Amino acid sequence: MNDTIVEARNLIKHYKDLNALDNVNLSLSANRIYGLLGRNGAGKTTLMSILTAQAFATSGEALVFGASAYENEAVLSRICFIRESQKYPDDFQPQHAFRSAALFYKNWDQAFADRLAEDFQLPIKRRIKKLSRGQLSAVGVIIGLASRAELTFFDEPYLGLDAVARQLFYDRLVEDYAEHPRTIILSSHLIDEVANLLEHVVVIDRGRIIMDADADDIRGSAVTVSGSAETVDAFLLGRKILHRETLGSLASVTVDESLGSRERAEAQELGLELSPVSLQQLVVRKTMAGVGSTGVGSDTGDFADDTLEARR
Amino acid sequence: MLMIDDSKPIFMQIAELIENGIVDGSMAEESQVPSTNEFAAFHRINPATAAKGVNLLVDSGILYKRRGIGMFVATGARAQLVARRTEEFFEQYVKPLALEARKLGISTEQLNTMIERSSGLAPESGTDKERSAAL
């Protein structure tokens, strides 16, 4: 069950003076849901494009189902890649897009696609050009789910989808995955929304993989300690600090370590507050670690609304 | 409503939820527990994670598998869980209680009075009950 279906070795991708991928090594196993997380421009789409042979690596090797996907029909027919802004022929209606998908994907389930179209209230006979942004995203989501490809990439598939429609997507994904296990790679900014769906998490930052771990191992792997600055600092002396915030004489410090029950008891006796760190907070902290000082009052806030370009 | 939180792995939280249901009697011994896919859909979590939580309880003999039918609560599961939780009770509840009382300057005598008073409350008002209500 845990056989490797994707293997990337030393992938490097240069765009002029930008290192989009900087020596990426990654392997993905069959029948798991992966989260591919990172900021805008971190290299998520580049990585997925190379794995699906829609872009070339400058160097390195990408094997999918044991072979290169490039012009390899046997491999490509088992992959579905739903892009953030998928293009369709001008005169296409959603039903045409579904029909094309049905020809290509051998596991295509038309009844499931019809059901999803109804769920998302998608007008399947309207020209795709005339669809709203959310409806356009729904077309991609439906193709991604109904294709039941062994390896399915969703690259920020929810642009323009409202909270209800996104929830619908997550619900259908979990239900259908339970019935038809396959490998799903979900690239997302909305980490809090997808965190519980993920079995394994890959975080990419400035072209490098900085985290590659099971979601269960990450949960509880960091903790925020708050209290009087002096006590907090003394308690955390020598620990790996991810983030520090102060307010007057109070400090709130996030450490990239878990605390044992004895340390927890000690913290309690010292009057320190311990609070869990969500996956989203952890990813924000880790991807900010390289940026240097995070400034006062920095918050996990809206991860999607970032200022990455300022860093380049 | 149950909330999966970030304090520990989800599979452990799923296991605890089932345990809570067994301890408070809402999941009777020899009754069938929901399938891992049902747990996954209900809590919107990865089915593999739900399965991991259920398997944790299978390994410790709380649940057992009937081939082709599903998972069931083992006879004696409740007694086993109550015994384990009683052991943990001091560390998990009594110690923090005493600590907070000391912080607030509540004397041992006052604390005892409060505990006596609280034992008059309905047994259903425990937090375990609330937590497992979602099951």
Image: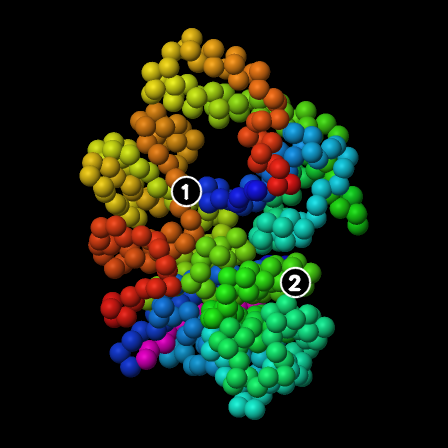
Asked whether the viewer can see residue A191, the reply is yes
* Crowd tier of the residue under label 1, counting other residues whose Cα lies within 10 Å: few below 14, some 14–19, many 20 or above: many
Give the residue at the far left of this rendering: A248
Instruction: Tell me what residue is drawn at x 43 percent, y 52 percent.
Output: A279
**Is residue B58 positioned above or below A113 on the image?**
above
The image quadrant that residue A61 belongs to is bottom left
- Number of numbered discs overlaid on the protein picture: 2
Residue A33 is situated, as x and y percent measured from the top left of the image, at 55, 60
Front residue (pair B20, A8): B20
Front residue (pair A295, B57): A295
Is residue A157 shown left or right of residue B14? left
N-terminal of the pair, mark 2 or mark 1, is: 2
Q: Amino acid at mark 2?
A: Asp
- The residue under label 1 is A276
Magenta stretch: give its range: A4-15
Circle 1 sits in a helix, a strand or a loop, which is it? strand
Is residue A194 shown left or right of residue A17? right
Quarter occupied by the C terminus of chain A: bottom left
| Colour mode of the rendering | rainbow
**Is residue A16 positioned above or below B88 on the image?**
below
Q: Amino acid at mark 1?
A: Pro
The subunit carrying tag 1 is A
The subunit carrying tag 2 is A
Residue B74 is situated, as x and y percent measured from the top left of the image, at 73, 33
Quarter occupied by the N terminus of chain A: bottom right
Residue A288 is situated, as x and y percent measured from the top left of the image, at 30, 57
Q: Are marks 2 and 1 on the same chain?
A: yes
